[in-house]
Amino acid sequence: MKEAVSVSQLNKYIKEMFADDNILKNVIVKGEVSNAKESRGNYYFSLKDDFSQIQCILFSSYSGQNVDVNSLVDGREVIVYGKVSVYEKGGNYSIYVTKIENYGLGEFYVKLEELKKKLYEKGMFDPLYKKEIPKYSMNIGVVTAKNGAAIRDIYKTIKDKNPYANVVLYPSLVQGDNAYKTIVDGIMCLDNLELDVIIIGRGGGSIEDLYCFNDERVAYAIFNAKTPIISAVGHEINDSISDLVADARVATPTAAGEMATFSYEDFESDLDNYKLTLDNLINDKLSLIKDKLDRLNKEIQLLAPNLKILRYKDRLIHSKEKLQIIINNKVNDYKSSLNRYIEMFKARDIIDKLSKGLAYTTNESGKLIRSVKDIRKDEIIISRLRDGIINSKVISVKKEIIKA
């Protein structure tokens, strides 16, 4: 029976085999660049053809000599020179690149550039058509994978800034042949809910993984949406079609969450500051009026006969009372407005209510159902829970008084 060797010994043996192979010492390979990334001056990418791919590494010591790093664009066809070696610690092999030559443009890259040119000529990238992202968004839609890191990052970022914000997820595919359709359906569905803003995207990936976000049908869904859309595809080297058409673009889902909402704590602080400023302005105005009245009283006492003084005094008293009523009404109006805004934002914490088992129920046209008088037998109703939507058919309607 042979003696067992360690993993390290086996990897070292394989690396030495590669090093002794004359062909692998000096290879020239043609292929299409995919998933190119840069880290600390080193470049990592895949070289692929229709049937296979191999990992490549270009160290920074070569990047300024025989290589134009601008050639490392996903979809571009290149010829690489180097050697094939094994990374012992990881047990994987790669081409260690020393030189790169441009060969041409890959089929995918050519098609993508043609689509970009077509949409650009239609004006779909024009800033003129881009909608402004609302400053105070409370209802935020998200089109992404249900169980992916993207939705977790978006939800956490939004809730950290504003715990009262309502996040509505449309779970979609984010890669694969049918992903574009679920993304289009998600955009159209959320657009009909009259939300403040919609986020679409995923947490990065290769250009192949992001193919659905370069689909022309996704581009038209974004462009035709009434709701402002933030694209967070997360691919730093290439612009996706969704990035170019969207009203705003960011590199990561976390950045999308930051852009989509506002700090509720800062908002409350702003309201307090506005109230303080308003109170100061009103007090200053009252003080000026009081000073003016005092001056007028003194002038009357000095210049007018007794009857005139009495007449002017009556008029001044009446004016003062009327002015005081107007000012008091104005102050009450401002205070009522401030209280309404504060209560409105607290009342809009839909997620908290849904988490306690309550449901937001409407008829098919979206009208809120407040009473059994609002529904009829056999009517379809829609109940929105925290984690989904239930469509129901009314079997019977029974009026019941719920006592507190």
Image (tube, rainbow, N blue to C red):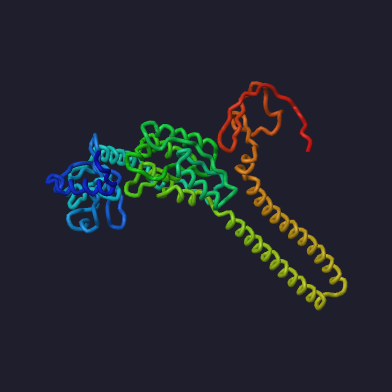
Residue drawn at x 54%, y 37% is: 193
Depth order, front residue of 139/224:
139
Q: Quadrant of residue 297?
A: bottom right
Depth order, front residue of 283/60:
60
Q: Is residue 235 left or right of residue 138?
A: left
Residue drawn at x 45%, y 47% is: 253
Q: Is residue 107 left or right of residue 241?
A: left
Q: Residue furthest left?
A: 22
Q: Is residue 17 left or right of residue 340?
A: left
Which image quarter is the N terminus in?
top left
Q: How many marks?
A: 0
Q: Is residue 402 visible?
A: yes
Depth order, front residue of 393/230:
393
Q: Give how far across and how far down residue 396 sits, in percent.
A: 69, 22
Q: Is residue 129 visible?
A: no
Q: Is residue 25 left or right of residue 170?
A: left
Q: Is residue 254 above or below residue 275?
A: above
Q: Quadrant of residue 79?
A: top left
Depth order, front residue of 235/333:
235
Residue drawn at x 74%, y 56% is: 329
Q: Give how far across and how far down residue 307 sits, in percent.
A: 87, 71
Q: Is residue 20 above or below residue 375?
A: below
Q: Residue furthest bottom?
A: 302
Q: Residue furthest front?
A: 1
Which image quarter is the C terminus in?
top right
Q: Give how far across and how far down residue 165 sits, in percent.
A: 57, 47
Q: Give how far across and how far down residue 13 sits, in percent.
A: 21, 47
Q: Is residue 379 above or below residue 4?
A: above
Residue drawn at x 59%, y 56% is: 265
